[in-house]
């Protein structure tokens, strides 16, 4: 049992209905699918947390973030890794389910399938605030412990921010000049 917190900014998603290039009905469906995919991602975290006997305190939905807060009392590094991976696995399962069930290739369905794949994959990139960063830190921490090297999370965080900015610049460059 956990609390669901919906912030007012969450409803800004519905303004996308007027901005997307499809019909209003298709835009509404598209926005709902993005929201559903984000909620399924978070439910993946919640399911694994429950399987690991970790209490989920709340699920928060806002315009920029969907996340869960868990009780850290009995949390181990392995449980943390499993819970973190649970969201991306749920996202990829949703992508594969949609891809399998809807074989038609209209431009609208291609847009939905592409968006689901991007949402699933992008969350694994070790950007600050994403699941990929948590997975990256847990893996680096494990490797450093095995090698007997001290792990400096602050330095790695700064490196990841720089890499994130560089990757965004490259993506912007590619999208503008392609």
Image (cartoon, rainbow, N blue to C red):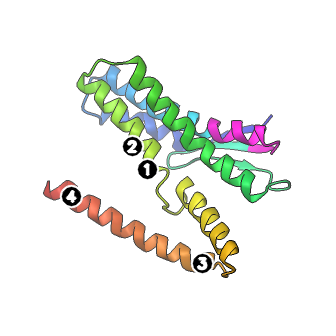
- Tell me if mark 4 has few (under 14), some (14-19) or many (20+) residues whose alpha carbon lies within 10 angstroms of its own: few
Provide residue 18's location: percent of width, then percent of height. Answer: 32, 32
CA–CA distance between discs 1 and 2?
Answer: 6 Å
- Determine the residue positioned at 70% across, 36% down: 47
Mark 4, residue position: 174
Q: Secondary structure at mark 1?
A: helix
Of callouts 4 and 1, the N-terminal one: 1
Mark 1, residue position: 122
CA–CA distance between discs 1 and 3?
Answer: 23 Å
Q: Secondary structure at mark 4?
A: helix
Q: Is residue 155 above or below residue 175?
A: below
Residue 95 left/right relative to 83: left
Residue 20 left/right relative to 57: left
Provide residue 86's location: percent of width, then percent of height. Answer: 62, 42
Whether label 4 touches label 1, CB < 8 Å: no
Q: Say which mark, if any, is on residue 154.
A: 3
Whether label 4 touches label 3, CB < 8 Å: no
Mark 2, residue position: 118
CA–CA distance between discs 4 and 3?
Answer: 30 Å
- Magenta residues, start to end: 43-57
Q: Is residue 130 visible?
A: no
Indicate whether residue 49 is drawn in magenta: yes
Whether label 1 touches label 3, CB < 8 Å: no
- Determine the residue positioned at 21% across, 54% down: 175
Whether label 1 touches label 2, CB < 8 Å: yes
Residue 178 left/right relative to 60: left
- Determine the residue positioned at 75% across, 38% down: 3
């Amino acid at each position: 049992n956990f609390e669901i917190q919906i912030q007012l900014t969450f409803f800004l998603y519905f303004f996308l209905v007027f901005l997307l290039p499809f019909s209003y009905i298709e835009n509404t469906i598209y926005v709902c699918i993005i929201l559903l995919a984000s909620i399924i991602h978070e439910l993946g975290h919640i399911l694994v947390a429950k399987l690991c006997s970790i209490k989920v305190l709340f699920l928060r939905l806002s315009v920029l973030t969907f996340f869960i807060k868990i009780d850290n009392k009995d949390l181990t590094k392995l449980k943390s890794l499993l819970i973190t991976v649970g969201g991306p696995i749920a996202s990829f399962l949703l992508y594969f389910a949609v891809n399998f069930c809807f074989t038609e290739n209209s431009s609208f369905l291609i847009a939905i399938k592409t968006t689901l794949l991007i949402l699933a994959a992008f969350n694994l990139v070790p950007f600050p605030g994403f699941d990929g960063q948590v997975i990256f830190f847990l893996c680096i921490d494990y490797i450093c412990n095995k090698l007997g090297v001290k792990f400096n999370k602050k330095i790695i965080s700064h490196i990841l921010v720089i890499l994130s900015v560089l990757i965004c610049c490259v993506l912007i460059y590619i999208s503008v000049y392609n």
